[in-house]
Image (cartoon, rainbow, N blue to C red):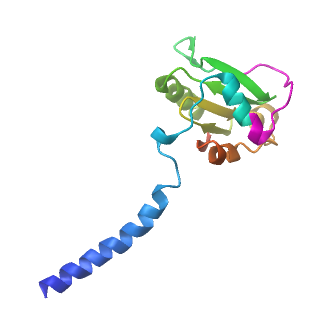
Amino acid sequence: MKRRRFLDIAVAIFLMAVPLTGCAGQEPGLENLQSFGSIDEAYAAVDDIVDCDSKPVGDPVVPMGDGVPLTSARRLCSENVQIDLYPNQDALEESYQTWAASRQGKIPLVRGSNWMVVDLSQIATGQQSTLNIERLAEKLNGVYAVVGA
């Protein structure tokens, strides 16, 4: 009787665990995220997927932390979509938290190991971007999120 009950419990635990393990690989772990050696390398990879504007107008927004820029380099992909390259994980995380705390509107972004693509179209124009940056997360092994409010 005890053996049968143990077997029933073991089967129930197995059946609950199988769906959970199926979901585990859908979002990449932080250790598996794509990284880039330079802003030009990051730009080329993003451009291959979303077809950046050849000469976007404007300047990227510079994420700041304690009065100093958090990025080591940044480049526009389109007028309101920028690519940021970070010198370390702390700078990337601080920048992410800054974007997330924004109260200017929703900000779609994709983050990798040492880079982020930030879409400020909705804040700048009130319209969603024509670039599909969500696809970047899939193609560049990054994490897509919509932050801000």
Looking at the picture, how far across and down is residue 46, in whole percent? 72, 35
Mark yes or no: residue 119 visible: no
Residue in the image at 49% along x and 55% along y: 25
Question: Would you say 18 lies left or right of 56 here?
Answer: left
In the figure, residue 121 lies in which quadrant?
Answer: top right
Residue range of the region highlighted in magenta in the rendering? 47-61
By secondary structure, the bulk of the magenta-drawn segment is best described as loop
The question of residue 48 being in magenta is answered with: yes
Q: Position of residue 2 (x, y in %)?
A: 13, 83
- Residue nearest the observer in this picture, 80 or 33: 33
Residue 128, placed above or below residue 81: below
Q: Residue furthest left?
A: 2
Q: Position of residue 84 (x, y in %)?
A: 64, 25
| Residue beneath the point at 49% across and 41% down | 32
The answer to which of 29 and 57 lies nearer the viewer is 29
Task: Pick the residue in front: 133 or 138.
Answer: 138
The count of marks equals: 0
Which quarter of the rendered picture does the N terminus lie within? bottom left
Q: Residue furthest top?
A: 67
Left or right of residue 137: residue 17: left
Please tell me which residue is depicted at 82% across the width and 34% down the height of the picture.
125
Task: Name the residue located 86 percent from the left edge and 28 percent from the top edge.
Answer: 54
The residue positioned farthest toward the bottom in the image shown? 1
